[in-house]
Image: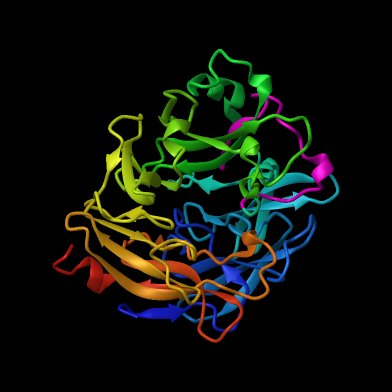
Amino acid sequence: MKVPVWCMTPHRGACLHRFFDTCPISPSGRYLALFGMPFENRLNAPGDLGHVVLIDLQTGEERVVAQTAGWEPQLGANLNWGIDDHHLYFNDVDCQTWEPQLVQLDPLRGTSERTKGGVYHVSPDGRFAAAASLEKMIRTQIGYGVLIPREKIGQNIGAPEDDGLYVTNLNTGERRLVLSLAEAARYIPELDGGDLDDWELYGFHAKWSPQSDRLIFTIRRFPRHGAMRFNLLSSDDPKQQIRYDVLTLRPDGTEVCNAVPARHWEPGGHHINWFPHGKKLSMNLGGFANELRFVQVAAHGDDLKLMHADAIGSGHPTVYPGERNVLTDAYAGEPVAFEDDTVPLRWVDLQSGRERCLARIGVRTEPQPNNALRVDPHPAWDRSWRYVVFNGVAPGENTRRVFLADLESVVNSSDQ
């Protein structure tokens, strides 16, 4: 280790924090909200209950504050903090009606409220939650939404008017469809004016800018063949290849643009994120000597370019304030990963191209019967831009835990 690292879950295995774009530490800095899987050796089924775990960072106390059926193994129940420590949001499913629900929990008092729909990402100002249809996300990829019986999951033939990006007012509980898939299709060059019935379209990532004034909404589509299909990201059939488009828009559904059209994704790529100032997007993109590179693009779709010509892209990158450095991890199969089921926590200098491995993170549990059960570190900054929370497997163990690294010496170094 090049930086101090602490295990946040020494007494509890099978835990994960949400994602690389969300701080799992409460607004006051006192609590850590995590998801506890009930098992790690199989995928969950509809109705299986996981746990919302609250850790007091002052006392070390761990306690389960809620149970939920609204989870999958990559992002758990999509836990998001709201405006303060009394507002914690996550997904659940009504197992009588099989409707996804958004839960607002006060983890300190134990009270909660529920509305329909669910949450993918809460705006940094704590006012709104955004999400696509979480139960349909499994059609393109397992791991990120909520599970209901497959026969109850709707099929999007073409681009429907009644599905798309939803925004919930967390003060009133009002939920609005701010951008339908039918409207979104107008911003996808291959679809505008074409026969939409040749495709199935589904929403996936919904990400607020740090300033809460703009959203990323990713559209995934694949050729329609009639049959009900699921998890097409894992399909080897080239005829079922998923196409990706990344839209940005205002929270009221206006000022829509296609920032990263599907043609840019053809050589490969993943993990769009906002720059800290909210004016540009970062991602990994392929096509550079058969390798990924870190790229940036304006939020309105202009000026797509490399961040550095030689720095290899990987994992889940976040641009540090000042735009000189990127923090990221890696997938076990990427070139920068090690060959012992560990991956680096990478600190990349975008001026020189040099990088430091700050830690080696274990990412394998056994058995792993499905790729959706992989352990992704998802390194996420706290609000002070000093600490980073990540998932991992400790040496000699066979369970996922959550860790915290102190990067003060790194961000304050002369390289910065």
The residue positioned 39% from the left and 45% from the top of the image is 285
Dominant SS in magenta: loop
Q: Nearer the viewer, residue 330 or 110?
A: 330
Q: Is residue 172 visible?
A: no
Q: Nearer the viewer, residue 98 or 415?
A: 415
Q: Nearer the viewer, residue 111 or 39?
A: 39
The percent position of residue 197, horizontal first and vertical second, equals 68, 21
The residue positioned 46% from the left and 68% from the top of the image is 390
Query: How many numbered marks are there?
Result: 0
The percent position of residue 179, horizontal first and vertical second, equals 55, 26
Q: Answer with left or right where residue 170 lies relative to residue 273.
A: right
Q: Which residues are magenta?
A: 144-172
**Vertical side of 59 occupied by 36: above or below:** above
Q: Give the residue at the far bottom of this rendering.
A: 396
Whether 290 is among the magenta residues is no
Q: Answer with left or right where residue 368 lies relative to residue 317.
A: right
Q: Quadrant of the C terminus?
A: bottom left
